[in-house]
Image: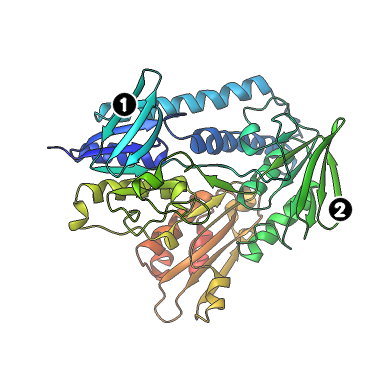
Amino acid sequence: MSTRFVIIGGGPAGNTAATHAARFGAEVTLIERDVIGGAAHLWDCIPSKTMIATGGAIAFTRRIEGMGLEQQEAEVDIDALTDRITNIQGRLKDNTTQLLESQGVTLLRGSARLIGPHEVEVTTAQGTKILPADAVLIATGTSPRIPEWCQPDGERILTTRDCYPPKIFPKSITVIGSGVTGVEFVHMFSSFGADVTLVVSRQQVLPQKDPEVAAVLEDDFLRRGVKLLKGARATSIEREGDDVVVRCDDGRVVRSSHAVLAIGSVPNTEGLGLDAAGVETDRGGYVNINRHCQSNQPHIYAAGDVSGKLPLSSVASMQGRKVAEHVMGLQKIAHRHLDYDKAASAIFTEPEIADVGLAEADAFAVGRKIRVTKVPFSATPKALINNDSRGFVKIISDPATGVVLGGSIVGRHAAELISVIALAVTANLKVTDIVESLLVHPALAEALAEAAE
């Protein structure tokens, strides 16, 4: 008898687990209440990066004089941009749906909840039914966090999901939250010409990142005219006529036409019946998992953002793959456990920011000896050719063995370039392996080899 594998949630974790388990011979049913492909992925990540790409094209036209061209001013066609976003979303959703169906996965559009350790109740437009399950994967993702002191209205006071497709581009906007999502929104709105204020609760943007990395981004924001309110925490957001007023705990007040909350997410676990199945969660509502993504109930797994690990689509997809292998017993053969410390991540600001592996500050905090080498892009011919020499490459290695432990990149195409360092970290390569690679010239990647010297 085939393994009956029920997956709740069709985002990167759920659909990857579904396709792999089906290939391994499982009888897979996937339940999704919103959109195949994942709400966070298709309603957050893809639209925001699409708008950032358009904003980047606009920003490029503002600096083409340095490339021997006359200055041009691009105008945004909101309808065309909206069509572009919805077309990309549709293509990705259709591709994912077709892949699942081609593997024999049963797709159910509706909501689901556990009513026991091995039973899932599914409610669709056709009614309610009970699915028996040998294994269950919870992959329901997260939703934007909304504090008690704010009530978004979807018009002027926005959550991140209210920002796209764009209805209008605000003349001025206050962004609350200086983490990854917050700084991406600052970049996006300022690229489209808005006056932007960023409320920064700490003394630097991106408080979890390398201070040198954050400093480059702060300098770029200030050059663009972005106002940084450091050391301030928003305590209320209210509409007053045509203004949105943000009040902070230190008495500072910001007025703008719009405000957007970017202060994190909450797990979508309410109403899932986790108590009925005996599944334990942490105080924030995230499902506790082990290295196999198992909950305290060994046959019930959690993956993606709801697992409380790194909220990255790449991590969610890899978790889904590992879950499928474990459900089908394939972990008994060659099986590499997912190492979250070696996951590469990127921030799609301008300049882009990417990092992987051990951070310099973390190494110093535990007294670990490291070798840090840094090369600015201003020393790289391709950066000068591109008329964009902002940023640097930093590589962290073990001084005794030369093994690459981590790295950071700030600059153009950082999200692509970090893959070289990520591969080195994952495969325990040495800096000499990068140095002795015959890279393209001229290319930004040359800075990687120079940093590895």
Q: Is residue 349 visible from the viewing direction of this image?
A: no
Point 80% across, 39% down: residue: 238
Helix, strand or loop status at disc 2:
loop
**Residue 99 vertical position relative to residue 251 in the rendered view, above or below:** above
Q: What residue type is labelled 1?
A: Lys
Point 43% across, 28% down: residue: 93
**Residue 41 vertical position relative to residue 33 in the rendered view, above or below:** below
Helix, strand or loop status at disc 1:
strand
Residue 272 % position (x, y): 42, 40
| Mark in the foreground, 1 or 2 | 1
Point 82% across, 48% down: residue: 247
Q: Mark 2 points at which residue?
A: 252
> Which is nearer the N-term, disc 1 or disc 2?
1
The answer to whether the residues at label 1 and label 2 have Cβ atoms under 8 Å apart is no
Q: Name the residue under label 1.
A: 129
* Relative depth, front residue between 363 and 135: 135
Q: Which amino acid does label 2 sit on?
A: Arg
Q: How many angstroms separate mark 1 from mark 2 (CA)? A: 54 Å
Residue 384 % position (x, y): 64, 52
